[in-house]
Amino acid sequence: MGTSYDSLKPEHEAFIKEQHMFFVGTAATDGHVNLSPKGHDSFRILSPNKVAYLDLTGSGNETSAHLAENNRMTYMFMSFQGKPLILRLYGNGRVILPTSNEWNELAEQFTIYEGTRQIIVSDIEIVKASCGFSVPLYSYEGDRSILLDWAKNKGEDRLVQYRKEKNAVSMDGKVTPIGEEFNRRIIDNGHV
C-alpha cells in the first residue's frame, strides 16, 4: 500500500530533482494507452500542485493527442539508485505550443533544446508514494545526445515538416494540437 498526499511535499520535490528519467502515461477515451519515458533536464515543479515538462520532437505525439481529448495524466518517477521509492503524480494535463500566450512565461523555466515542440503543463490532484522494493538497481551513465543531435542536424524548417508528417495525428488517428495548428494555418491562408 502506498501513501497518498494532496500535493508535492519538500521530500517529494527533492526526490524528483534527483531523478534522471520519468514516465508519462495518458489515454484517450478509446484506442491505445500511451506510456512514454522522458529524459534530459526537462521536468519542472512550478508549485506543489503544478508541474510541467519540455516535450521534444519524437516519432509520435500520443501524449498530446490524448490530452486534447481527455486530459487525465500520470507521471511516474522511480529510484534506480539509493533508497527505493516510486512516486506517481496524478492529475490533468494540457499542451502549450510555441504559439500559445503562455509559452514565453513557461519557456523561461527551461533550457530550450533543439527540437522542442511543446510544453506539457499538469495540475496535480494526488501524489502517491510506494516502496519500489522490486525496482532493480541501475547506474546512471549520462544522457544520450542522439535526439538533440538529430534535431540540430535536421534544422527548424525540416523539423516543422517532420512534425507535420509524424506529429499531427496519433497512431489511433486523433488530431494533436500541432495538427490543429497546421490545419488552422491552412484555413487562415485560404488554402481550403
Image (cartoon, grey):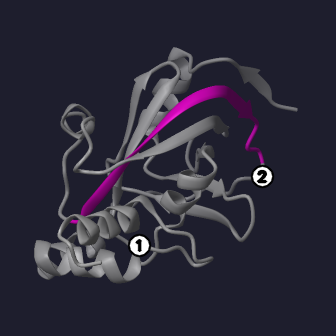
- The residue drawn where x is 88% and y is 32% is 1
Principal secondary structure, stretch drawn in magenta? strand
Percent x, y for residue 59?
42, 78
- Residue at x-position 17% and y-position 69%: 189
Nearer to the camera, 157 or 190: 190
Labels 2 and 1: the sequence-earlier one: 2
Give the side of residue 129 with respect to residue 98, left or right: right
Please name the residue that numbered disc 1 is placed on.
Answer: 168
Q: In this view, does 127 lie to the left or right of 144?
A: right
Local secondary structure at mark 2: loop
Q: Name the residue under label 2.
A: 134
Q: Nearer the viewer, residue 83 or 178?
A: 178
Assess disc 2: are there few (<14), some (14-19) or many (≥20) residues with their C-alpha within 10 Å of its C-alpha: few
- Camera-side residue of 38 and 47: 47
Name the amino acid, label 2: Ser
The magenta-colored residue range is: 115-133
Does the magenta run of residues contain 119? yes
Residue appearing at x 55%, y 47% in the figure: 81
In this rendering, is residue 32 above or below 98? below
Place of residue 43 in the rendered image (x, y in percent of width and height, measured from the top left): 39, 42
At label 1, the amino acid type is Ala
Q: Can residue 167 be seen in this view?
A: yes
x and y percentages locating residue 16 in the rendered image: 49, 35
User: From the viewer's perspective, is residue 89 above or below residue 113?
Assistant: above
